[in-house]
Image: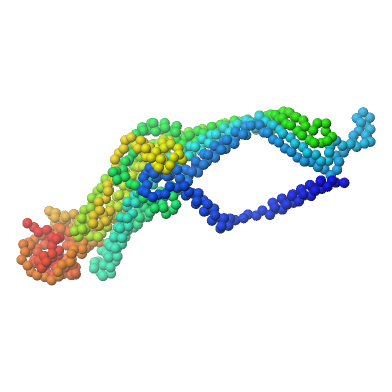
Amino acid sequence: MIPLSIRKIARKSSLLLLSALLAGCAVQPQKLTNQELLSQKESDFASMFANREAVDHPLSLSEVIARSLRYNMDHRVKRMEAALATRQLDLDKFDTLPKLTTSAGYTGRDNVSASSSYSIATGAMMPERSTSQDRERITADLGLTWNLLDFGVSYYNAKQNADRQLIAQERERKVLHNLVQESRSAFWRAAAAQQLAPRVAATVKLAESALADAQKAEKSQLRSPLESLRYRKTLLETLRQLEATQQELSTAKVELAAMMTLPPGTPLQLQIPQEGLTAHEWQMPLTEMEDSALMRQPDMREMAYQSRITATENRKALLKLLPGISINMSHQYDDNSFAMHQEWNEAGMRVSLNLLNLLSAPDQLAFAEANETVTQAKRQALRMALLMQVHIAHRQYEAAHTQLQRSEALFRVEKDIAQHTGHKAAQDAQSVLDRIASETNAILAELRYYLALSQLQSAVGKMMATVGQDPEVGIIQEGSLEDLSKRVEQWLQSNSARKQAASIPHQEHASTPTHPTNSATAQAGSFEQQTTRSAAPAASSSEQSNKSAEAELPAAVVSALADTTEKLPDTTTGSATKESPLLGRKGTVQLNTWVRRGPGKDFDKVRLLHPGDKLTVLELSGDGQWLRIGQNAWMHSKLLAPHS
């Protein structure tokens, strides 16, 4: 008869096994609900932007770098990976220790473990059956096992993971270098956006207004259709370039905020140096750069550690060919009432060898040798690529340095042109098209200046990353953000023993916007030359040369320049003959202007006068502002230079 306890255990075990089988068969893929996704998003956002100092003041370059180093998500991930590698190394140390295991169990059966025997001497069967084991018993043991082969494999695994920890640290260094490089470059791109965005918007508004006026003039047929179309085309090209610049500037601060892991839409104001910019002058000779890169660059160090991991892997594979030696010791317990001793100690040793592994030994040795050869070739290829990278980075730095100087010089020229154009516009001596063109040229020149500075800063950062020069700012997570910013500022200053001053030429604003665009097309480039040439006084020694120069101008531009007189003050219409020293004298036209049917800008246009045209004054208007130069032909007196 089966004992009651045995039957209860058997019934419970059967139910437990059946439940496990049913649960395994019932597993189905379950999608995340919207509530779960929302909860995960809110949790991530709370963690991403937690413990951030508020941005309530203009950010300097050193603070931007400090915030990027401390809060950038990519750097945080690499830092955590390095910490994880350290934890893995701590765990690997336990794999080299012997295995100390303990176990306990219950055994029960529904009948007696009985047996019979026979006599070896006589061969006769013994008439009685016997048992030496209880139907229910409890066993336990505590054993220490040490496999020398497993110890060797675990030892090599620990060495490989130690090298992987060093690789994680080198990858963190690489992210650190890239962060410093990108932060410096992004800062100056954002500075360009901060300085230029309002002026770009003002110029776009001015160009759109001029375009609307041009469309009205075209509808009223005040000029020929071809001239109107050319004028509109020039304005549209300028607008296209201004809007492209506007789009480029609009993303600069967004990228900078993301680099510092600030919430989207955080308003940023940058502290741009007012006393002038300082461009780092690189002093390390090229040969020293090569040596430093081959010794300290993170990728090169990572490859060196990877070579060591490969060599360790080959040794580990060869170790597995050896026989395994296992040593074990244990303490046993069995509550069997028939046993003489219910507790006892055991000890033993076992040697095992997979004979088939011996057949693969030659192939494994050949594979290990080939693996080391491939790793060595990769390391040499990386050295060659790194040497090339050093020289390329050096050339890029020199080119960026030269480009900065050229951009600064060009910006100063464009600034002066914009100022002159602004002064003439204030005196109603330049057209709207001239003002827009000079404004756009100056804006693009200053933008190129900032971008050249950004490229130079990026080139310096790339040089530092290439030679493995770490930012000497101490422990990034140590101290407050203000302390870290001060350490970054000290490092930036000490790292620039020699500095080349590249002061920002601040734009001097005229009464109208004075920062224009350089067209990306050849036509816009010629437009800049044409407007500059047409703005110069044309009191030349030869009328023929003036005519030929004027003939080079597109009709739309000439017409636009002539429209300058439309901005002159209103005058009293009506004619009044008046004695004047100008009467009867000859003069030379200074700028493109219209001849009108009467003394005022409200009269119809008759024809166009060009710089260098010579004419005689026949009559002066009552207010002295208009000159009659023919029958029903009047021009403004300011645009005529009388001969002596």
Q: Quadrant of the C terminus?
A: bottom left
Q: Is residue 436 positioned above or below 220 on the image? A: above
Figure coloring: rainbow
- Locate residue 203 relative to residue 112 in the image: left or right: left
Q: Is residue 326 positioned above or below 481 on the image? A: above
Visible residue check, residue 529: no
In percent of width and height, residue 247 lies at 37, 55
- Of residues 81 and 486, the one nearer the viewer is 486
- Locate residue 291 relative to residue 642 in the image: left or right: right
In percent of width and height, residue 207 lies at 29, 60
- Of residues 10 and 511, the one nearer the viewer is 10
- Locate residue 299 relative to residue 607 in the image: left or right: right
Name the residue: 62% across, 32% down.
96
Q: Is residue 430 positioned above or below 317 on the image? A: below
Q: Quadrant of residue 223?
A: bottom left
In percent of width and height, residue 118 lies at 91, 33
Visible residue check, residue 3: yes
Name the residue: 58% across, 55% down.
32
Name the residue: 35% across, 39% down.
397
In the image, farthest residue toward the bottom: 574
- Of residues 381 and 347, the one nearer the viewer is 347
Q: Is residue 587 positioned above or below 282 on the image? A: below
